[in-house]
Amino acid sequence: MYLLTTCCAGGWKRFAEHPAAHEAARTLAQPCAWGDAGLLAWVLMPDHLHLLIQLEEQPLGRVMQQGKSRIAVAVQRIEQAPPPFWQPAFHDRALRSEEDIRRAARYLVANPLRAGLVDEIGAYPYWDAVWL
């Protein structure tokens, strides 16, 4: 189980506008976007993405490459933005205990609230979690 963060190249706020954020969220929700990994929770921020993923067979780097690529292709179809889309690297943190997973999920879901994008978590449209 991993908590992952990946950022848009150059700090560009690619997901600040609804069409790009909506397309990215739609792509995120497709099971095929993450190979055989299970996407347990995610939140799409204006300039980055947080994920909570459970790996199966594919290595983490391959899962992230596949997911980031699918999102970039989908969003670039509607906004015609020049590459690069994502920063090449990502931050990962392995989660070992149930308490680590709960803490990571709470952190992830509350990100828009902490960033001042909304006054309550339910008002932010670009997130999901399997526990709902």
Image (cartoon, rainbow, N blue to C red):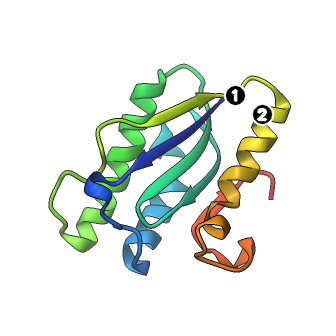
Determine the residue positioned at 80% across, 59% down. 132
Circle 2 residues within 10 Å: few <14, some 14–19, many ≥20: some
- How far apart marks 2 and 1 lie (CA) works out to 6 Å
On residue 111, which mark appears?
A: none
Q: Earlier in the sequence, mark 2 or mark 1?
A: 1
Residue 81 percent across, percent down from the top left: 19, 66
Q: Is residue 18 or residue 27 the one in the foreground?
A: 18
Q: Are marks 2 and 1 in contact (CB under 8 Å)?
A: yes
Mark 1, residue position: 95
Determine the residue positioned at 52% across, 32% down. 92
Indicate left or right for 55 with 13 as reference: right
At label 1, the amino acid type is Leu
At label 2, the amino acid type is Asp
Q: Secondary structure at mark 1?
A: loop
Mark 2, residue position: 100
Quarter of the image with the N terminus is top right
Residue 87 percent across, percent down from the top left: 30, 45
Q: Is residue 40 above or below residue 126?
A: above
Determine the residue positioned at 64% across, 78% down. 118
Residue 39 percent across, percent down from the top left: 61, 43
Determine the residue positioned at 78% across, 43% down. 103
- Visible in this render: residue 36? no
Tell me how many marks there are.
Answer: 2
Q: Secondary structure at mark 2?
A: helix
